[in-house]
Image (tube, rainbow, N blue to C red):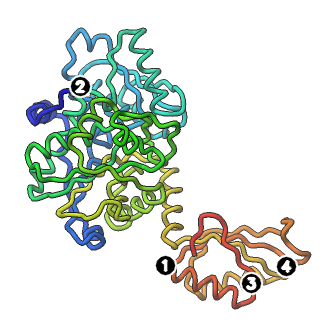
Amino acid sequence: MDLLTLADVEAARDLLAPVVKKTPLIPSRPLGEITGVPVWLKCENQQRAGSYKVRGAYTRIARLSGAERSRGVVAASAGNHAQGVALAAGLLGTRATVFMPEGAPLPKVSATKGYGAAVEYAGTSVDDALEAAYDFAATTGAVLIHPFDHADVIAGQGTVALEILEQRPEVTTIVTAVGGGGLISGVAVAAKALRPDIRIVGVQAAGAAAYPVSLEAGAPRKLDACATIADGIAVRRPGDLPFAHVAKLVDEIVTVQDEDLSAALLVLLERHKTVVEPAGAAAVAALLTGAYVPLDGPVVAILSGGNIDPMLLMRVIEHGLASAGRFLRLAVRCTDRPGQLARLLREIAGQRANVVDVNHSRQSPRLSFGEVEVALSVETRGPAHSSALIKALRDAGYRVALLADSTP
């Protein structure tokens, strides 16, 4: 299978020049302090349509013949490729139909429709939606715009690396999220051609890590199941063409847990004032956890997308705070007498913790007669503060239990 060349990516860059933004590359002091090397963030979350995907989608659709465009295009996506295809199709004057899994994030669905595409639902995964897109293409004549398994798509995604090397020529390591493999393939083609010494590291969610097993087998393998909060990289099987590039050009594929992704989102929000989706935070998660060592710097971590459902963002923030020991959910038992709740809250206030919500219950089979249970969500400054709060409550005579998703 022939691999792409630097010329392919450079041609895509010329095609995309009037369409895409040259996204910023910003320094990350917090990540630099953690890793011990300079770290820069490539902000593709600020790209048009909220991710790098428009680069590949536009390159692919722009190279269709007039007759092909007249038949329309079809795609399958959990959201980012959908928006990229919808935007590109609108710019190039062709109609787009996008198949999305049931339960796809509403903001991504709304944005895809907003760019002018028709949205259909199929199955519960990107793989299910892709099968429906193939069927639609076969019956209608629409041209399938694959999310990652096409040379034009890979060439378009590779323009991210050209920008990185223009902005930070001394980079020694590029880290990026991996789903089907289109982005890392394009990045590796361009980066390795210009700087063979650069290390390319891919990051997959542990619940959707199709590349490690495929690389071990020497060919793409399909996972039996796929479960992660990072819907943008929840792909059960690598693409054939991306796999060939990854096997030849990529130095390492590592995995991170969903907890690592939520912690990375929290760091990006708090320390960088940057909103990304879980898949977009995968490279940062790998740096935070030390999943890839030894690390040679300067390092560029690609923030691949920023299209996150606000409801998911709320849950991820809460989970990230809990994982960092800064959010506790406690069940406290006390006697059912007037003033007891106020006394409990004064005790918590005395420890300089902030109560987020309170639920006061008398109807639990766990309670003795004359007892109440108070369930509280409490913000703290970290694990040491959380432990001090729990100790203070127990020293004051309260029976305290941690509820789910709390870390003392």
For the point 55% across and 73% down, the residue is: 379
Measure how far apart labels 4 and 1 are at the Cα level. 30 Å
Q: Quadrant of residue 361?
A: bottom right
| Secondary element at image label 2 | helix
Q: Quick check: 312 left or right of 83? A: right
Measure how far apart labels 2 and 4 are at the Cα level. 68 Å
Residue 286: image tag: none
Residue bearing the label numbered 3: 398
Residue bearing the label numbered 4: 336
The residue nearer to you, when weighing 78 against 260, is 260
The spot of residue 373 in percent (x, y) is 78, 72
Label 3 is placed on what type of residue?
A: Tyr
Foreground mark, 2 or 1, reads 2
For the point 71% across and 72% down, the residue is: 331
Q: Is residue 347 above or below residue 86?
A: below
Label 1 is placed on what type of residue?
A: Arg
